[in-house]
Every structure is written in C-alpha cells, then in structure tokens.
Image (cartoon, rainbow, N blue to C red):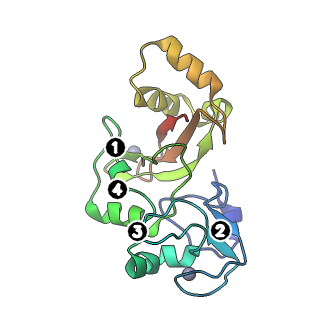
Amino acid sequence: MSNQEYGNTGLPIFKYHLDPIRSKVIETSDTQCKCCGISRGWIYTGPVYAEQEFYEQLCPWCIADGNANAKFDASFVDDIGIGSGDGWDSVPQSVVDEITKQTPSFAGLQQEQWWTHCGDAAQFVDYAGHDELIEFGTECIEIMKRYWDLESEEDWELMFEAMKKNCSPVAYVFRCLKCGAYGGYWDAD
Ligand SMILES: [Zn+2]
Ligand SMILES: [Zn+2]
C-alpha cells in the first residue's frame, strides 16, 4: 500500500492516517477554513467534535498543526474509541492526543473505533469489503472476525461474504506502525 499520490499533493502527512483523500475525508474545495481563514483548495469532510459546527470548514493544515484543536477545542476522533476493542492494546496519552487532536478521522457507519497494536495506535489504511480483506490477508481477517462476538462461524461467513467497500457491512483496515500487521474492525448500519 503506497500513498505516493497523496504525498505529491503537498498536503500534510498524518502519521496515523495513510491517505485521507482515498478515505474521502479530505476533498478539494474552495471553502475558506474557519480556523486560518485561508482557502487552500482542500477541506476536511470527516467527523468533528466541537461546540460549534465545523462540518466541511477546516483545512487539513489546521488539523495537522493542532491549531483547530487549540482555537476551538475541536477533536476529530472520540478518545473512547481508541483501543476500544476486546484485547486491543492501550496506548500512551500522547498517542491519544495526536489521534484526537491532530489526525483526520474516517467516516464510519457507527461511532469510529481506532485499532491499536504493539502498544501504539495503528494507521488507518482504508475501508474494505470481502475482496479487499482477502488481499489484506488471513491474519487481518481473523482480527476482523474476532471483533464482534458472533454466535457462529456461519454468522461470520454471511457477514464476511456481504462486506463491501463503501457499503454495509464494511471493514475498517489499519496497519500497525510497529510490526506492519493489518487489522481493525467492521460494522454495519
Ligand atoms: Zn486552516
Ligand atoms: Zn503490531
């Protein structure tokens, strides 16, 4: 998985989010950023938690440098979701802060969770359906399977077969920055 195309845009690089253009939370737009007041050609379209409404009103730079957080107490990921899964690692507060305050989220069907591994938060890679998950490998599929305590193997097979990228049910794939393993979770609406 490479994000070379993203790297060529001049947008800030986010350690914990591989390619926010591909995950459709950073899009081209003429909108003036509510934080820096500049129309930079790009706007963040993912979830924002703040007193005011900031939907499609913050630029990626004001997320990356922490200004949107400092100025409006805006956060982008709910800290409750970080490392929330059964058996997922807990992570240092500094990591929680970087994810919540300086990292674009992704668009989950339900409250976003953030996979953790090797004592660190993992990097969000992409949404995935059945076919994409097969490419991420059996280890990744096993982690997805364990996320919900399903009644039977058949229940899982039905869900797995039905998974589609950008649809429901859908998997959210992350990559561990320490060991390179793929994992994450899935949900449905
Ligand atoms: Zn800005
Ligand atoms: Zn790991």
Q: Quadrant of ligand 2?
A: top left
Foreground residue among 168 and 163: 168
- Residue type of the residue flagged with mark 3: Lys
Marks 3 and 4, Cα distance to the nearest angstrom?
A: 10 Å
Percent position (x, y) of residue 130? Answer: 64, 29
Mark number for residue 101? Answer: 3
**Residue holding disc 2:** 7
Marks 4 and 1, Cα distance to the nearest angstrom?
A: 9 Å
Q: Secondary structure at mark 2?
A: helix
Marks 2 and 3, Cα distance to the nearest angstrom?
A: 21 Å
Mark 4 vs mark 2: which is more N-terminal?
2
Residue displayed at 63% across by 54% down: 23
Q: Classify mark 3: residues with Cα within 10 Å, few (<14), some (14-19) or many (20+).
A: many
Percent position (x, y) of residue 9? Answer: 70, 72
Residue displayed at 37% across by 49% down: 81
**Residue holding disc 1:** 84
Would you say the beta carbon of the disc 4 residue lies within 8 angstroms of ligand 2?
Answer: no
Check contact, mark 2 vs mark 3: CB within 8 A. no
User: Of the residues tagged 2 and 3, which is closer to the observer?
Assistant: 3
Mark 2 vs mark 1: which is more N-terminal?
2
User: Of the residues tagged 4 and 2, which is closer to the observer?
Assistant: 4
Percent position (x, y) of residue 85? Answer: 35, 39
Q: In which image quadrant can residue 134 be found?
A: top right
Mark 4 vs mark 1: which is more N-terminal?
4
In the image, residue 10 sits, relative to residue 125, either above or below, namely: below
